[in-house]
Structures are given as C-alpha cells and as structure tokens.
Image: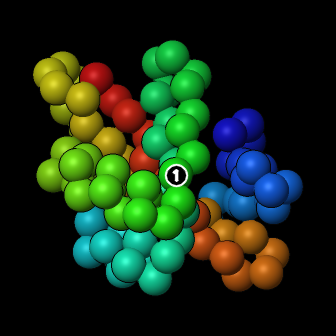
Amino acid sequence: MEQGRLTSPDGVLFQRRGTKAKRRICDEAISRGAPLVLFYWAGGQLDWLDGPDAQAVWQSVRAAVTVEPRARGELEWTAGLWQSEADQTVVVLTGHC
C-alpha cells in the first residue's frame, strides 16, 4: 500500500488511479469479479478477498462506504479502484474510525 501501489498475492502490481469511488462503481467492479482489499489504516492490516468471499464481504461493508468519513464514530470505508498494467481492477477499501 506504500505510495499508491499494491502487489496482489500472485505478484500483480496495482496502482491507485483517480480519486474515491462511489458504491455504485464498486458494485459494478465486484460483480465483474474484481478482488476486494480491506485496508485497516490505523493498524496497517490488509485483507485480500476474491470470488464469492469478495462479494460476501462487500455486501457486509457496503453500507459503511462513504466519500467523506466522519472524524468520530463507527468504522467507515473510503473506496478506490486500482488498476494493473494489464487493466485488471481491484476495489480497495480504506477503513476509518
């Protein structure tokens, strides 16, 4: 996750492209099979999920995705679409609390 780069478990390099993504855009990417990454910013923990696991976790966190997280309160996520050089997409959620 350093400097806008992320390497997948199989060695594919992804880079952050653009700004925050809205839920609808993430819905589309996940439904097309994009992996989902949960990055817990405060703890530095990163979880990589794909296939049915990505879809299930996305459904459980979707309501907490926002473009402007609150300063205090429950865990919220900002979302972004990251791309590989081969045009593969991964949905990256960064947790804020």
Where is 74 relative to 84, above or below? above
Q: Tell me: 96 left or right of 7.
A: left
Q: Position of residue 27 (x, y in %)?
A: 31, 73
Residue 7 located left or right of residue 18: right
The image quarter in which residue 21 lies: bottom left
Q: Can residue 77 be seen by looking at this rendering?
A: yes
User: In terms of depth relative to the viewer, which is nearer, 17 or 25?
Assistant: 25
Q: Which residue is mark 1?
A: 49
User: Which of the 4 image quarters holds residue 83?
Assistant: bottom right
Amino acid marked by disc 1 = Leu
- Number of residues whose C-alpha sits closer than 10 Å to that of mark 1, classed few (under 14), some (14–19) or many (20 or more): some
- Where's the C terminus, which quadrant? top left
Q: Position of residue 40 (x, y in %)?
A: 46, 29
Residue closer to the observer: 10 or 21: 10
Q: Nearer the viewer, residue 25 or 60?
A: 60
Residue sitting at x 24%, y 57%: 59
Coordinates of residue 45 in the picture (x, y in percent)? 55, 25
Kindly identify the residue that appears in the image at 27 percent across and 66 percent down.
23
Asked if 51 appears above or below 75 in the picture, the reply is below
Q: Is residue 61 left or right of residue 21?
A: left
Q: Residue furthest front?
A: 52
| Res. 18 visible in picture | no
Q: Quadrant of the N terminus?
A: top right
For label 1, the SS is strand
Q: Position of residue 69 (x, y in %)?
A: 25, 38
Q: How is the image coloured?
A: rainbow
Does residue 18 lie above or below 58 as drawn?
below
Vertical position of residue 65 compared to residue 12: above or below: above
